[in-house]
């Protein structure tokens, strides 16, 4: 099922969601993350942290390269058929749509969703925003053995 949002925008949203997820995770201020011992060992310039295993480990963990970036070497990009960020984004979105499988909700999550839906149905019914025919259809759907995955 394709969205009406252009594919390259969907990819940008996925990259943005990753940034937000990382932001919400907060800053790790543990001794392992701040590496005070390593700072004491390497010291200021001309000391270099690039050869340290801590730097390599934490760089892999903390770095993020948007999936829409073209990671081909410049020579390959110039010598071949240039592929832009929009084309990368389109390919990545197609891959996600074709391969992503959401994990099923737990029983408690399913119950929470059902509670919200029931509250919404009752509210809209009390406000006269769901007519008798629609209410009957809801009730029939709720009693279906295929609900909620019909």
Image (spheres, helix red, strand yellow):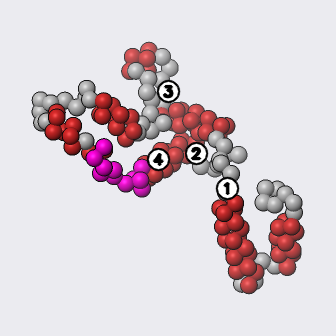
Of circles 3 and 1, which is in front? 1
- In primary-sequence order, the first of circles 3 and 1 is 3
Label 3, on which residue?
A: 83
Nearer to us in this view, 75 or 97? 97
Nearer to us in this view, 148 or 30? 30
Residue 24 seen in the figure: yes
Nearer to us in this view, 12 or 35? 35
Residue 78 seen in the figure: no
Q: Check residue 143 in the rendering and tell me which mark sits there, or answer none.
A: none
SS class of the residue under badge 1?
loop
Q: Residue at x 19, y 29 (%)?
A: 48
Circle 4 residues within 10 Å: few <14, some 14–19, many ≥20: some
Place residue 130 in its image quadrant.
bottom right
Asked whether residue 142 is drawn in magenta, I would say no
SS class of the residue under badge 3?
loop
Compute the Cα span from label 2 to label 3.
18 Å
Q: Check residue 18 in the rendering and tell me which mark sits there, or answer none.
A: 4
Label 2, on which residue?
A: 6
CB within 8 Å, label 4 to label 1: no
- In primary-sequence order, the first of circles 2 and 4 is 2
User: Which segment is the magenta one?
Assistant: 22-32
Up-down relation of residue 34 to residue 139 (above or below): above
Label 1, on which residue?
A: 105
Of circles 4 and 1, which is in front? 1
Q: Residue at x 84, y 65 (%)?
A: 141
């Amino acid at each position: 099922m394709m969205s009406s949002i252009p594919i390259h925008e969907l990819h940008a949203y996925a990259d943005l969601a990753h940034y937000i997820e990382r932001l919400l995770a907060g800053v790790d201020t543990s001794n392992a993350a701040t590496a005070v011992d390593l700072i004491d060992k390497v010291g200021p310039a001309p000391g270099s942290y690039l050869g340290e295993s801590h730097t390599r480990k934490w760089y892999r963990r903390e770095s993020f390269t948007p999936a829409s970036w073209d990671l081909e070497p410049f020579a390959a990009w110039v010598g071949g058929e240039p592929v832009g960020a929009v084309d990368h984004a389109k390919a990545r979105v197609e891959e996600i749509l074709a391969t992503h499988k959401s994990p099923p909700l737990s029983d408690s999550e399913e119950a929470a969703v059902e509670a919200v839906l029931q509250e919404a149905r009752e509210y809209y019914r009390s406000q006269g925003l769901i007519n008798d025919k629609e209410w009957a259809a809801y009730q029939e759907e709720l009693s279906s053995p295929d609900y909620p995955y019909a």
